[in-house]
Amino acid sequence: MKSRRSSPAQSPANATGGQLRIIGGTWRSRRLSFPAVPGLRPTPDRVRETLFNWLTGTLEGAHVLDPFAGSGALLLEALSRGAASGLGFDANSAAVSSLRSNLQLLQCSNGEIRQGDALALLAQTPTQAFDLVLLDPPFHQDLLAQACHLLEQHGWLKPRAWIYSESEQAPSSLGLPSHWRLHREKQAGQVHYALWQRLEEES
């Protein structure tokens, strides 16, 4: 689940929606609106700040995938901080429309949003592999492990890609691919968040 964007009067915000603030990079302190969509929850600023501190030195020129984009806070933050490209998926038409509008508002030409079910889209063969994948799916729907295995099965990941996960469970209990190394983890309230690195599988 996700939600992020902000830019007061200019962004086509739903009056009952919310706002997100980009923390760092080119668009630092920009506020963008996101719509009121059931299940959308923004990753808190302090969690995002911690994540992007973990990613220092890896974002410049990276190709980033966000399969559960929601408001787009994580994807926009990555683009603001120097990612070469960003691709986001979301099934909700209001969230997709809002995120596309915010990319236009920011004059961002290297971000793309596709509407559709994340698992169905991940079951397709990508046109390129990604350096960083941001996984913040709706909780209690058993989506995270499925998404991770589809990333592996269909060639979405570069050999030493980084994968960020948010979940209601501790990272050690998620059942993610065995050759993903847990790099960092923390907990904020009921949310566990972690950064993984994909290693070469042992033959």
Image (cartoon, rainbow, N blue to C red):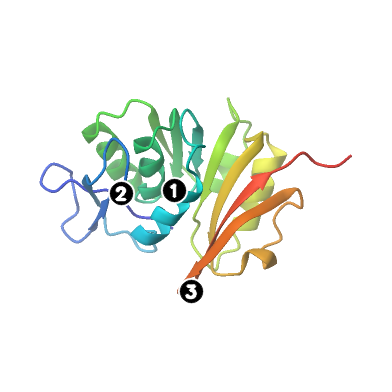
* 130 in relation to 75, above or below: above
- Any mark on residue 32, and which? none
The quadrant in which residue 80 appears is top left
What's the residue type where badge 3 is placed?
Gln
Could you tell me if the residues under marks 2 and 3 are in contact, i.e. CB atoms within 8 Å?
A: no
Q: Secondary structure at mark 2?
A: loop
Hey, which residue is sitting farthest bottom in the picture? 189
Percent coordinates x, y for residue 109 in the rendering? 33, 25
Work out how far the residue at label 3 is from the one at label 1, CA to CA, in angstroms: 20 Å
How many angstroms separate mark 2 from mark 3 (CA)?
A: 23 Å
Q: Is residue 41 visible?
A: no
**Number of the front mark, 3 or 1:** 1
Q: Is residue 156 above or below residue 197?
A: above
The location of residue 108, given as percent across then percent down, is: 30, 29
Q: Quadrant of the C terminus?
A: top right
Which percent across, then down, holds residue 57?
Answer: 49, 37
Q: Which numbered tag is attached to residue 52? A: 1
What separation in Å lies between label 1 and label 2 (alpha carbons)? Answer: 10 Å
Q: Which residue is mark 3?
A: 190
Element at badge 1? helix
Q: Residue furthest right?
A: 203
Residue 23, which numbered label? 2
Task: Examine the image and state in which quarter residue 121 appears.
Answer: top right
Name which residue lies at 68% across and 67% down. Answer: 173
Sequence-earlier tag: 1 or 2: 2
**Type of residue at label 1?**
Phe
Q: Residues within 10 Å of mark 2 (few under 14, many from 20)?
A: many
Disc 2 or 3, which lies upstream in sequence?
2
